[in-house]
Image (tube, helix red, strand yellow):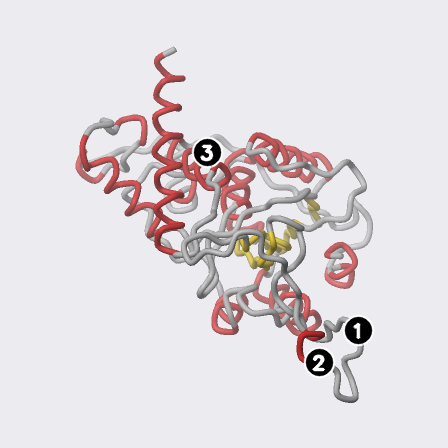
Amino acid sequence: MIGTLLAGALLMGPDAGAVTIRQVAPPVATQSNEQDAPIPLEGVTVTGRPLTQLIQQFVNEVAAPNRGRGLARWDTRICVGVANLQVETAQYLADRISTVAGDLGVETGAPGCSPNLMIVATADGDALAREMVDEHERAMRMGGAGMDQGRTALAAFQASDQPVRWWQVSMPTDTDSGQQAVRLPGDCIGSCYGGGSAANFAPNISVFAASRLNTQIVDNLFRTIVIVDVDDVADVSIQQLADYIAMVSLAQIDPDADTTAYATILNVFNDPGTATQLTDWDLAYLRGLYGAVRGDSNLRAGRTEIRDSIRREHEALREDAVD
């Protein structure tokens, strides 16, 4: 698992050489022009097309599914591991991200579980990213169709200048059986050599409802690696950092998304005063993603389902605010 995978890249022991992230209060943001202010979701009127358009634009901007695949989410237990930070800081990050995941209905692992979401702090993110790829590329690109963003994105992951960078692997999965729905290199069932059937090399999925409109194959997040450049996150609070990591690790988020028009935690490194925690935009997006059924064969229809789910979550958030 990832804990073993990264062992060679991490510092030995929980306190040896550990880094402390300073917890500072975010500065108060000032707006010279109200029209330039990010749009808070709770400030949008739920009538007509404006909200629908805003949600569509937000989803189109931030969502980053793998090529030819639907939006992925965690569907099984998530286990958060944190390395190279002081114990208290590491525990806070793990607990906060696990709490957000649990609120979305994702089962969280108990202490000592084998991490499938690994957060690694470092003073040199480029060097660590290159080392991970050089030594463990097979774990980051497992070879199955549609499981990652591709070689170009992996190169961008290594060269990123962002304070936090991430790499995710997802698995096309049969919702009925939980079986992987894509062949990995080396997979074989029965006799695969000396004239064995080609069917032995691929997963065998029993289709319970054949349809051109619906599918029982969905995409589930399988592994996420997050690298934090500690020198570049000093101006945000520990909660801001935790919530940012929660957002980019619980969903497939485009690292190059332009979200300046929205009040979202994704803007925190450009403007720490934008959000002190996950905003209503963020919560509606995550709850919409995890509340969607994801049964459409058409990828565009699947994304529409996510948007409709986000709108319902927005309306629920407004009702909670009124109550």
Pointer 1 local density, CA inside 10 Å: few below 14, some 14–19, many at least 20: few
Image spot of residue 204 (x, y percent) = 66, 65
Q: Please give the name of the residue rendered at 34% of the width and 34% of the height, measured from the top-left corner.
A: 311
Q: Please give the name of the residue rendered at 33% of the width and 33% of the height, measured from the top-left corner.
A: 29
Q: Contact (CB < 8 A) between labels 1 and 2? A: yes
Image spot of residue 223 (x, y percent) = 64, 55
Image spot of residue 165 (x, y percent) = 53, 56
Quick check: 46 left or right of 197?
left
- In-front residue for pair 237/151: 151
Q: Please give the name of the residue rendered at 48% of the width and 63% of the height, measured from the top-left corner.
A: 160
Which of the labelled discs sits on residue 197, or is there none?
A: 2
Q: Nearer the viewer, mark 3 or mark 2?
A: 2
Which of the labelled discs sits on residue 190, or is there none?
A: 1
- In-front residue for pair 152/29: 152
- Name the secondary structure under disc 1: loop
The residue type indicated by label 3 comes to: Leu
Image spot of residue 290 (x, y percent) = 50, 39
Measure how far apart labels 3 and 2 are at the Cα level: 51 Å
Which of the labelled discs sits on residue 278, or is there none?
A: 3
Of the numbered discs 1 and 2, the one sitting upstream in the chain is: 1
Q: Is residue 302 above or below residue 280?
A: below
Displayed quadrant of residue 317: top left
Pointer 2 local density, CA inside 10 Å: few below 14, some 14–19, many at least 20: few
Q: Is residue 86 above or below residue 63?
A: above
